[in-house]
Amino acid sequence: MSLQNLEIVPRLLPDVRADRKRHTIRWREREIVPDPMLYVNVQDAFDTVMVCDTVAVIHHLPPAV
């Protein structure tokens, strides 16, 4: 299995690095499992942060009316 990765906007990276941002909400993206993950800056693929995802919760939205 390869390392999971998610793209992240650059303005959030300082908070991730300082451990102030500890959760994220994603919509219509692939399933994430608890494991190490690499956050990748959407504007600079060489700017990355390794994190450890410890919990992944999936919430299903109700159908549109």
Image: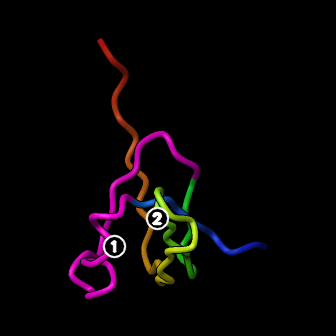
- Mark 1 surroundings within 10 Å by alpha-carbon count, few (fewer than 14), some (14 through 19), many (20 or more): some
Residue 63 image-quadrant placement: top left
Give the residue at mark 2.
Answer: 41
- Residue 25 sits above or below residue 2 on the image: above
Residue 31: image location, x then y, percent = 57, 55
Identify residue type, mark 2: Asn
Residue 18: image location, x then y, percent = 26, 88
Asked if residue 19 is among those painted magenta in the image, a careful observer would answer yes
CA gap, disc 2 and disc 1: 8 Å
Residue drawn at (49%, 59%) of the image: 7
Helix, strand or loop at label 1? It is: helix
Assign the C terminus to one quadrant of the image. top left
Residue drawn at (51%, 64%) of the image: 44
Which residue range is magenta in the image?
Answer: 9-30
- Mark 2 surroundings within 10 Å by alpha-carbon count, few (fewer than 14), some (14 through 19), many (20 or more): some
Give the residue at mark 1.
Answer: 13
Q: Are marks 2 and 1 in contact (CB under 8 Å)?
A: yes
Residue drawn at (33%, 62%) of the image: 24
